[in-house]
Amino acid sequence: MIGKKVVSFKSIDSTNTYLKENQENFVDGTVVVSKIQEKGRGRGDRVWESTNGNLYLSFILKENISYGRIFNILSRVCVSVINLLGKYEIEAKIKYPNDILVKNRKISGILIETYGNLVLEGIIVGIGINVNQIDFGTLNHKATSINNEINREIDVEAFQSEFVETYNKTLIVDDMSIFDEYLKHSMVLGKGIDYQGTNYKINTISPSGELLLTGEVETKRVSLNEISLEELYDE
Ligand code: BT5
């Protein structure tokens, strides 16, 4: 369960960075939120634009964790975001592995990071959901928010609680059902991809998060870490 302890900031560099740097002070399931992030991060060295009015939330997992469970945790978060948006009558899709899109515009992104030297000690899960932002500047063509979709301002604090509640509800659902939900809402199946210079079709995603690719001469299994997503999608 997450959110028994919640730490809230008005402003911080990044809720993920904060949890990572202070992990020893926080128990399993602690949630950190901030109204804005000065250095919101995406994957790699990408930036997550983090102005006031949206949800920036991270939580830490320290118990019952393993590298093998990361895709399942990611799936639970994606399914939670999809279900929560559904409550606002927004139909969203999952763009493998971690983007939530509405009509091809990104409404939410998820960043999972791990720490530990020889063994995995903890997992930090960061979620950004665009709630009230109307103007995304240079990202206007590829970003959207709840407010943009339904023309209504949302109380971010109430939305934050709804997210935590929705995520906690997924914890009583078994892994396979979560995975089925992830696949059901996934938008990449059947899409073409250029992997290491060869064209493949994305056949399916395995329960551990690998892509199963079918080419003209061979099939391939590619793990989350092996594939450059730039190869997959043009950004
Ligand atoms: C992600 O990265 O989508 C993960 C975003 C995770 C953000 C959360 S907020 C709480 C926690 N604290 C953090 O510092 N991070 C996490 P990626 O797949 O690499 O996508 C990044 C790309 O999305 C950028 O290069 C932009 O193209 C686009 N982008 C940036 N800000 C956006 C926004 N607010 N809405 C939609 N798209 C955005």
Image (cartoon, rainbow, N blue to C red):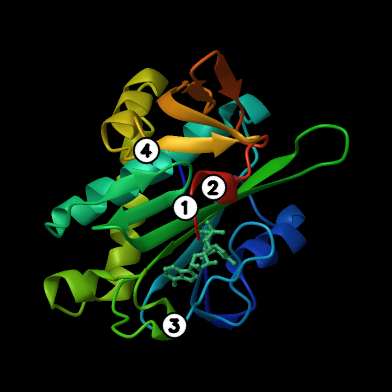
Residue at label 3? 138
Q: Based on the displayed image, in which of its 4 quarters is residue 146 positioned?
A: bottom left
Q: Quadrant of residue 137?
A: bottom left
User: Does dot 1 land on a helix, a strand or a loop?
Assistant: loop
Q: Amino acid at mark 1?
A: Lys
Q: Which of the labelled discs sits on residue 147, or is there none?
A: none
- Cβ(mark 3) to ligand 1 < 8 Å? no
| Numbered circle sitting on residue 188 | 4
Q: Quadrant of the N terminus?
A: top left
Q: Position of residue 7 (x, y in %)?
A: 54, 68
What amino acid does circle 3 point to? Thr
Query: Which residue appears at 31% of the width and 24% of the height?
Result: 180
Residue in the foreground of this view, choosing between 22 and 131? 131
> Distance between the Cα atoms at labels 2 and 1?
7 Å
Q: Alpha carbon of mark 4 to alpha carbon of mark 3: how far?
A: 25 Å
Which residue has dot 2 on it? 29
**Residue beneath the point at 48% across and 63% down:** 57
- At label 2, counting other C-alpha atoms closer than 10 Å, the crowd grade (few under 14, some 14-19, many 20 or more) is some
Asked whether, in this view, residue 200 is left or right of residue 53, the answer is: right
